Amino acid sequence: MTETLLSVRDLKVSYKVGRGTLDAVDGASFDVPRGSIVGLVGESGCGKTTVARALTRVIADNATISGGQLLFEGRDLAAISEREMNAMRWRDIAFIPQSAMNSLDPVYTVEYQLNEVLRKRGGLGRAQARKRCEELFEMVGIETNRLGDFPHQFSGGMRQRVAIALALALNPKLVIADEPVTALDVIVQRQILDQLRELQQQLGISVILVTHDISVVAYICDRTVVMYAGRVAEQGTMEATLTQPSHPYTMGLRNAFPDLQGAASGMLTPINGAPPNLALPPPGCRFAPRCPFAIDKCTTVSPETLEVAAGHGAACHRADEASKLRKLATRTETWMTTEMAEA
Amino acid sequence: MSHLKAAASRTLQLAFVLWAVVTMLFLMFRLMPGNPLAAYIDPTFTEEQQQALMAQFGLNEPLWKQYLIYLGNLLQGELGQSFRYREPVAERIMTLLPNTLILTFSSLIIAYAFGIIAGAWLAWRRGALVEKTAIPLVLTTRAMPEFWLGMVLLAIFSFWLGWFPAGGTRPAGANYDSLFALYTSSDFLTYLALPALTLAIYSQGLPLLLMRSNMLDVMKEDFVTMARIKGLSNWTVVVRHAARNALLPVMTSFAIAVGYQLQGNVVVETVFSWPGLGRELVNAVSNSDYPLAQGAFLMIAVVVILMNLIADLLYALLDPRVSHA
Ligand SMILES: Nc1ncnc2c1ncn2[C@@H]1O[C@H](COP(=O)(O)OP(=O)(O)OP(=O)(O)O)[C@@H](O)[C@H]1O
Ligand code: SF4
Ligand SMILES: [Mg+2]
């Protein structure tokens, strides 16, 4: 088993909204082994970005990390001082945002923005920084004569490559990519993902890839962490979670997406209903209102994570019946029943 | 290439506006009720002077010919004789224009420098006590009438404390070798201080509030969040990224404000007996000194139009999305 770079333990992040609070992440735990790509997947609003940003500790003004540990090489990022945290930002943990257009400053050239981290955060001199800029552009496959261009002069795909170059500038140990290809068309998506995979292996870094698209996970991830309504529903290796999903939500997700290769594998079946309101989460299993397999216990008792195989866990009361449920889950009728039950 | 073309078309556009203003002025002063000659000839001029002006402006020619002569004269900077000063209008205006420009620019530069820094700072300290007390204060300064503010400053700093002279641009009887010597003398600065301060206080609210609200918007942008995730210092995040972007529209408003201020100057120039263009325009109108009024009006229009052009060019210069399209 490879060494663990990051271990998130029981993370809780709350937003202050009006007079109350909303627990956007409510006890999430998962591991990131060194040198692997971990896909953090789930529907919109399930708390993926909140987890990703908590790892940098640059969170919204109304957010607080209200519990849990973020053990990075054994050191708890949630407990260190802001000064210590800042020293680690970008040098140890870098970030690739969804929209490189908005995350690059429009008034500076790309070279200026690379130089900024190389010189201010990496302590490089002018000549060294210049060399490194060229190196980084070569790594991501952009001609070095475009270093002096402004962000708006690049195409969407190229801007995303610039964002990757920027993230790799200081040789971080962990790169967090929050929906890095969501805004791009499928062909460019694949190019960027291929590139990311190649660089990740070449440099031996770890990546947390945030996405709502399970086909992206299937395409490049080593491990999967499936989130639902602020909690981790299932996690394990990519093969195990996608070929033997043990949580009904993962089973449903798999039916709901075409794969990235373009071949539509059978009919797409959406999961009916919507995620719960996080300000008022249902008692018991948060997926119960949408789950075709819910039993009485599900609406009252919150499920613990059950280890279905080594390194493969699912937070479901019926995880031990997973192989039976998987068969049912491949049928479209199974997912229709919930709709009818609700209607 | 394309932005050169854009600049050229913008220049042409403004040239057209200038022509329209010039034509309007012509019509306004020619079609005035009463004797059309009144626009250029004062009855107290000598017979000779009257004849000379008649010839120079073609005053007994048909209107369209007068118009062409008028345009030709303008191109040569010929604006007629001031009734009141008995000297060429162009000369008169050229001695007043620097006073007005110096007052306008010095007060606006102070106002903008202060407004930009204070606005950015208040945005950064959003929600803090300073911000909550400063904003109503700024709004109050925006609501104070200029003349009242001018009088208060006069009363305190000139009459009471005696730190600054009460009006004019130089000590009585003082003479300088050249205008340049006047404008660079320390005396001149003491005369400039109070009117410039009045205008600066009056004008700082706009850049301050504009800068603050732009900053608040920009600080929500992804690239500012990213700058923090990069671990850059607060200074770099707030100044290099947030303020630099928030500055763009404020700089453009500076150029527009210059044009706007030229009108506002009238009051302050009057309170401080500052020999500027605005005050002269008002005097000229009330004294029926038509050539001078026409000239002053034209000059102000030229400055306003020019500043609009500068505003556009400045924006293009500061925003790479325009200059590197
Ligand atoms: N600043 C905030 N204040 C209040 N609530 C917030 C804030 N940011 C996010 N939330 C809420 O927290 C929950 C999780 O949001 P988050 O952005 O982490 O989701 P996500 O999984 O990244 O979704 P998406 O796929 O849409 O990006 C959502 O319900 C969202 O509405
Ligand atoms: S715990 Fe119950 S409701 Fe939740 S996923 Fe498992 S079966 Fe469905
Ligand atoms: Mg998100």
Image (cartoon, helix red, strand yellow):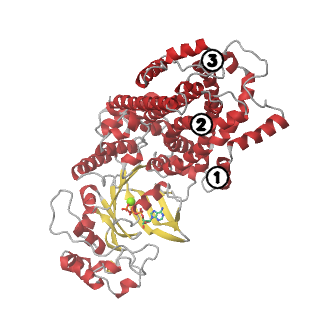
Label 3 secondary element: loop
Where on the image, by quarter, is ligand 3? bottom left
Q: Taking B36 as reference, is A337 above or below it?
A: below
Which residue is located at x 64 percent, y 51 percent?
Answer: B139
Q: Foreground: B147 or B310?
A: B147
Q: Which residue is mark 2?
A: B263
Earlier-in-chain disc, 2 versus 3: 3
Which quadrant holds residue A170? top left
Which residue is located at x 51 percent, y 18 percent?
Answer: B77
Q: Amino acid at mark 2?
A: Gln
Q: Which residue is mark 3?
A: B45
Label 1 secondary element: helix
The answer to the question of whether label 1 and label 3 lie on touching residues, with beta carbons closer than 8 A, is no
Q: Which residue is mark 1?
A: B135
Q: Position of residue A321 (x, y in %)?
A: 27, 80
Residue mark closest to the camera, 1 vs 2: 2
Residue mark closest to the camera, 1 vs 3: 3
Spatial distance from mark 1 to mark 3, Cα to Cα? 57 Å
Q: Position of residue B165 (x, y in %)?
A: 79, 29
Earlier-in-chain disc, 1 versus 2: 1
Disc 1 chain ID = B
Q: Is residue A109 visible?
A: no
Which quadrant holds residue B107? top right
Residue mark closest to the camera, 2 vs 3: 3
The answer to the question of whether label 2 and label 3 lie on touching residues, with beta carbons closer than 8 A, is no
- For the N terminus of chain A, the image quarter is bottom left
The mark total stands at 3
Spatial distance from mark 2 to mark 3, Cα to Cα? 31 Å
Which residue is located at x 27 percent, y 73 percent?
Answer: A271
Q: Taking A32 as reference, is A316 above or below it?
A: below
Which residue is located at x 65 percent, y 26 percent?
Answer: B99
